[in-house]
Amino acid sequence: MNLSKFVRQAHRWVSIAFTVTVVVNIILVASGKSVEWLYMLPLAPLLLLIPTGLYMFFLPYFRKPR
């Protein structure tokens, strides 16, 4: 598997983890079981989504024409 496919696959799975953490955060805040560290929980996947998303965004600009 080349780097581009690996980055896309990793980005997909991390985005699923990010979505799950945001949904869990919303549910727990709505139920009144809010904890301060809970607000920071989605930041971990988000920090992984930023470099992979930027890589995929700029990839077409740096590829050599076929």
Image (cartoon, grey):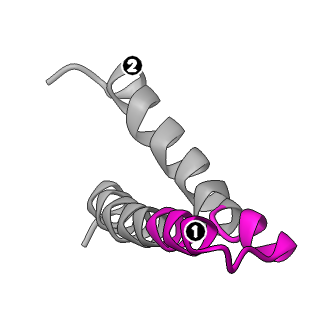
* Mark 2 secondary-structure assignment: helix
Q: Amino acid at mark 1?
A: Asn
To which quarter of the image does residue 2 belong?
bottom left
Residue 56 in the figure: left or right of residue 64: right
Residue 33 in the figure: left or right of residue 48: right
Q: Residue at x 67, y 57 (%)?
A: 47
**The residue stretch that appears in magenta:** 21-42
Q: Is residue 64 above or below residue 50?
A: above
- The residues bearing labels 2 and 1 have C-alpha atoms spaced at a distance of 36 Å
- Please name the residue that numbered disc 2 is placed on: 61
Q: Residue at x 44, y 66 (%)?
A: 23
Is 44 in front, or is 58? 44
Q: Residue at x 52, y 71 (%)?
A: 21
- Where is residue 39 drawn, in percent x and y? 74, 63
Is 35 in front, or is 12? 35
Is 1 in front, or is 38? 38
- Please name the residue that numbered disc 1 is placed on: 25
* Mark 1 secondary-structure assignment: helix
- Where is residue 50 drawn, in percent x and y? 59, 46
Question: Is most of the magenta stretch helix, strand or loop?
Answer: helix
Residue at the far right in the pictured view? 36
Specify few, some or many for label 1: CA neighbours under 10 Å numbering under 14, 14-19, or 20 or more. many
Q: Residue at x 69, y 71 (%)?
A: 41
Quadrant holding the C terminus: top left
